[in-house]
């Protein structure tokens, strides 16, 4: 993204993770990880990531693990 670091207080995802994370392959996981890194980069300290998802098992566990590692 072309946004500056720490530019946003909130990032909203309405179904993007679900649309991208259709398979639990290394290629897809890599795309999701890049997306989450960019979200982390543009969020201010204390910012919020709101993710509206169906929370399939592979998606929910990856999101939880990713945020636990940040």
Image (cartoon, helix red, strand yellow):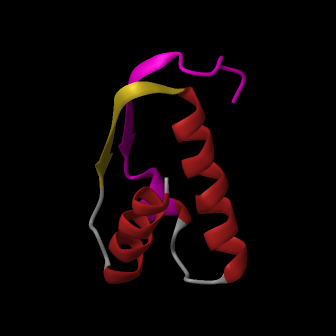
Whole-percent x, y for residue 62 in the image: 44, 72
Residue in view at x 69 percent, y 30 percent = 1
Left or right of 19 on screen, residue 56: left
Residue in view at x 28 percent, y 69 percent = 55
Whole-percent x, y for residue 50 in the image: 30, 41
Q: How many numbered marks have been drawn onto this rendered protein structure?
A: 0
Residue in view at x 62 percent, y 71 percent = 29
Observer-nearest of 45 and 33? 45
Observer-nearest of 29 and 37? 37
Observer-nearest of 32 and 46? 46
Task: Please tell me whether residue 16 belongs to the stretch shown in magenta.
Answer: yes
Left or right of 24 on screen, residue 14: left
Whole-percent x, y for residue 26 in the image: 69, 80
Q: Which residues are magenta?
A: 1-19
- Quarter where residue 42 is shown: top right
Task: Please tell me whether residue 37 belongs to the stretch shown in magenta.
Answer: no
Left or right of 5 on screen, residue 54: left
Seen in the picture, residue 58 relative to 21 is either above or below; the reply is below
- Quarter where residue 53 is shown: bottom left
Residue in view at x 46 percent, y 51 percent = 16
Seen in the picture, residue 37 relative to 66 is either above or below; the reply is above
Seen in the picture, residue 1 relative to 50 is either above or below; the reply is above
Seen in the picture, residue 57 relative to 65 is either above or below; the reply is below
Whole-percent x, y for residue 33 in the image: 61, 59
């Amino acid at each position: 993204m072309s946004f500056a670091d720490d530019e946003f207080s909130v990032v909203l995802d309405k179904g993007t993770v679900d649309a991208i994370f259709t398979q639990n392959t290394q290629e897809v996981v890599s795309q999701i990880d890049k997306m989450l890194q960019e979200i982390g980069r543009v969020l201010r300290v204390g910012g919020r990531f709101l993710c509206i998802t169906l929370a399939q098992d592979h998606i929910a566990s990856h999101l939880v693990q990713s945020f636990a590692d940040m």
